[in-house]
Image: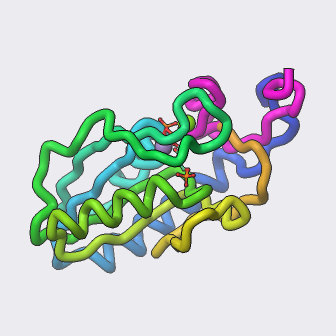
Amino acid sequence: MHDDMEKVLITEEEIQEKVDELGKQLSEEYKENFPLVVGVLKGSLPFMADLIKRLDIHIEYDLMDVSSYGEQMVSSGEVKIVKDLNTSVKDRDVVIVEDIIDSGLTLSYLVKLFHHRQAKSVKIVTLLDKPEGRNVDLSPDVAGFTVPDEFVVGYGLDYIERYRNLPYIGVLKPEIYEG
Ligand code: PRP
Ligand code: MN
Ligand code: MG
């Protein structure tokens, strides 16, 4: 475990088992649809990369880079498109892949945007759900794990850009972000 972690919340093995399970579930659900799987950068990258390899159906994937936190600890309240999709979502079955839903702001923005762009359907798959963080009424269609209201990092989740590369989800020692 990395020195800056208070504890490991979800091990690498537990994550990989869950991704297997979600991959099977989505492969069954979308086998007729040729879904457009949208990864939300940067946080979703490890989950996205692992998940798409478990889909044994035809899919198309694309990436979008949005940010609402920047270097702040608390959501700024506005979602910024850093890089838009290259693909049209019109008449497509869209599956949004996220690392975590906290306030719900990022995803509620994206869901609205894709409906506005006339997607046929929009579903949310998130590895982590933190219901206690919620500011807007939003729930994922598929969630891997529910996490408590703690500062979680790893497997894509960062604290000022660090820890994204860890293969597990850990809780950061308070002294790291209080200092
Ligand atoms: C984080 C995380 C989610 C979002 C969740 O992204 O990856 O995308 O915040 O929070 P919310 O539900 O309160 O909107 P961030 O904006 O930090 O960008 P990043 O993925 O590049 O780290
Ligand atoms: Mn993100
Ligand atoms: Mg972030």
Residue 99 is left or right of residue 178, and the answer is left
Q: Nearer the viewer, residue 119 or 173?
A: 119
Task: Judge from the rendering whether residue 120 lies leftward or rightward of residue 127; answer left or right.
Answer: left
> Residue 36: which quarter of the image?
bottom left
Q: Is residue 171 magenta?
A: yes
Does 70 sit left or right of 10 as displayed?
A: left
Of residues 143 and 83, the one drawn nearer to the viewer in this rendering: 83
Give the x, y percent position of residue 46: 47, 40
Q: Quadrant of residue 112?
A: bottom left
Q: What residue lies at 52% left-to-right and 71% top-to-bottom?
A: 138
The outermost residue toward the front is 77
Residue 17 in the magenta stretch? The answer is: no
* Residue 60 drawn above or below residue 1: below
Quadrant in which the C terminus appears = top right
Question: Against 21, is 100 above or below?
Answer: above
The residue sitting at 85% across, 27% down in the picture is 178
Camera-side residue of 165 and 128: 128
Residue drawn at x 54%, y 60% as measured from the top left: 104
Q: Position of residue 9 (x, y in %)?
A: 77, 49
Instruction: Pick the quarter of the image with the N terminus.
Output: top right
Q: Position of residue 78 (x, y in %)?
A: 46, 46
- The magenta span reads 154-179
Q: Position of residue 74 (x, y in %)?
A: 65, 41
**19 to 164, vertically: above or below:** below
Q: How many marks?
A: 0
Instruction: Give the residue at x 12% y 50%.
Output: 87
Magenta stretch: helix, strand or loop mostly: loop
